[in-house]
C-alpha cells in the first residue's frame, strides 16, 4: 500500500553488484509487505556496482511506486546504510540485505517497536533459538567476530551484522554520530544505541547461505579486526566513565509460512520482472526469480 504521506515502514536495502538477486528480493519484499497491508516504501541504496545493478534498480523503480533508488559514487556498505537511514521517511526502518531478509523478522520487530518495548531490534544468528545453516567456517567467523566485539566494545547483543529494525526518530542522533563507514557501521550503531540505553532487543534469526562469500574470509577477518580496534579507540571501553549497557532483552522468534514461488511471480511486483529487458529477466530467473525466504 502506498501513500503520499510518510509511510509507516521504510525498508532499506544496500545493494552492490546484485544483478542476479535484486529482482527476486524486491519482488518478494513488495509482495509480502503488500499482502500484510502495510504502508511502506523500499529504498535501494546502490554504490559502486559494475554489473548493472543501478540500471536494474531504476527499471524496477519505474514500475513499482513503492520503490525508490539512491545512488552514491563509491562502493561502501556503511556509507550506503547511513544514506538509506537518512533518506528513510518511515516511522520504523528495517535494514535487510539483498541476500538475507525475512519478513517474519519484520513482523516480530514491528510488534515490539509498535508496543514501545524497544527502539532497536537486532536479528542474531547466535541467539538461543536461531538457525544458522551457513557453512561451518562462516559460522566460526561470526562467532569470533561477535566475541571480539563483546570483549573490545562491551557489545551486549550476540551478533550485530544482519537484519535490524529501528524507531527512526529515536535512532537518528545515533546514526548521525557514527563515524565508521564500511562493514562495521552496524556494530557502531548497535553499540552506541546500547550505551545510550535506548532499548535494544535481539531476536533469533534463521539464515542460510544464498551465495558463497564475495571476499576471501582471511581478508574479511583482518579488515574486521582492524575495524574493531579502530572502533574501540573511537568509542572507548564500555565501562570507562559511562554506564555499561542495560541488561539485554531477548525474545523468541515468530514464524510465518513461506509464500510459494509461483504465487509471488503472479503478483504485480512479479510482473515487473517479466517486463524487464531480457538479460535482467534471465538473471532473475536463474537465481530464483521470486518466492523463497522472505514472504
Ligand atoms: N551499497 C552497497 N551495498 C553493499 C556494499 N557491500 C555490500 N553491500 C550490500 O550489503 C548486503 C550484504 O553484503 P554481502 O556481500 O552479502 O555481505 P555478507 O553477507 O557479509 O557476506 C548486500 O545487500 C550487499 O549488496 C557496498 O559497498 N555498497
Ligand atoms: Mg550476504
Image: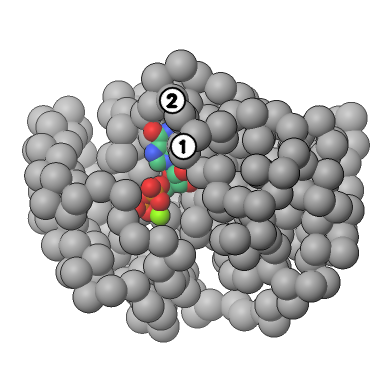
**Label 1 near label 2: C-beta < 8 Å?**
yes
Residue 9 screen position, x and y as percent: 71, 45
Q: Residue at x 17, y 28 (%)?
A: 234
Q: What is the secondary structure assignment of the residue under circle 2?
A: loop
10 relative position to 48: left or right: right
Q: Quadrant of the C terminus?
A: bottom right
| Label 2 – label 1 distance at C-alpha | 7 Å
Ligand 2 is found in which quarter of the picture?
bottom left
Residue 45 screen position, x and y as percent: 55, 32
Q: Does label 2 point to a residue whose CB lies under 8 Å from ligand 1?
A: yes
Residue, disc 1: 16
Q: What is the secondary structure assignment of the residue under circle 1?
A: loop
Quarter-of-image position of residue 54: top right
Residue, disc 2: 48
Q: Does label 1 point to a residue whose CB lies under 8 Å from ligand 1?
A: yes
Q: Residues within 10 Å of mark 1 (few under 14, many from 20)?
A: many
Dot label at residue 146: none
Q: Is residue 60 above or below residue 133?
A: above
Amino acid at each position: 500500500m502506498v501513500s503520499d504521506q510518510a509511510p509507516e515502514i521504510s525498508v532499506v536495502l544496500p545493494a552492490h553488484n546484485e544483478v542476479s538477486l535484486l529482482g527476486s528480493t524486491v519482488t518478494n519484499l513488495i509482495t509480502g509487505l503488500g499482502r500484510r497491508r502495510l504502508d511502506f516504501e523500499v529504498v535501494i541504496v546502490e554504490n559502486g556496482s559494475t554489473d548493472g545493478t543501478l540500471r536494474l534498480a531504476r527499471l524496477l523503480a519505474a514500475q513499482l511506486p513503492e520503490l525508490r533508488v539512491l545512488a552514491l559514487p563509491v562502493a561502501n556498505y556503511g556509507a550506503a546504510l547511513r544514506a538509506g537511514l537518512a533518506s528513510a521517511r518511515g516511522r520504523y526502518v528495517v535494514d535487510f540485505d539483498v541476500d538475507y531478509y525475512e519478513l517474519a523478522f519484520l513482523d516480530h520487530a514491528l510488534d515490539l517497536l509498535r508496543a514501545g518495548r524497544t527502539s532497536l531490534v537486532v536479528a542474531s544468528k547466535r541467539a538461543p533459538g536461531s538457525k544458522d545453516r551457513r557453512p561451518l567456517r562462516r559460522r566460526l567467523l561470526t562467532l569470533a567476530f561477535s566475541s571480539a566485539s563483546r570483549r573490545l566494545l562491551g557489545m551486549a547483543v550476540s551478533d550485530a551484522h544482519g537484519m535490524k529494525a529501528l524507531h527512526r526518530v529515536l535512532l537518528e542522533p545515533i546514526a548521525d554520530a557514527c563515524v565508521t563507514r564500511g562493514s562495521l557501521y552496524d556494530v557502531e550503531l548497535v553499540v552506541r544505541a546500547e550505551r545510550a540505553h535506548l532499548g535494544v532487543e535481539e531476536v533469533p534469526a534463521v539464515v542460510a547461505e544464498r551465495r558463497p562469500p564475495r571476499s576471501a574470509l582471511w581478508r574479511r577477518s583482518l579488515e574486521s579486526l582492524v575495524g574493531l580496534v579502530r572502533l574501540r579507540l573511537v568509542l572507548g571501553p564500555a565501562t570507562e566513565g559511562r554506564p555499561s549497557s542495560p541488561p539485554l532483552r531477548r525474545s523468541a522468534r515468530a514464524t510465518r509460512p513461506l509464500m510459494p514461488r509461483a504465487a509471488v511471480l503472479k503478483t504485480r511486483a512479479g510482473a515487473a520482472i517479466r517486463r524487464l529487458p531480457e538479460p535482467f529477466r534471465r538473471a532473475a530467473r536463474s537465481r530464483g526469480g521470486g518466492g523463497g525466504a522472505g514472504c
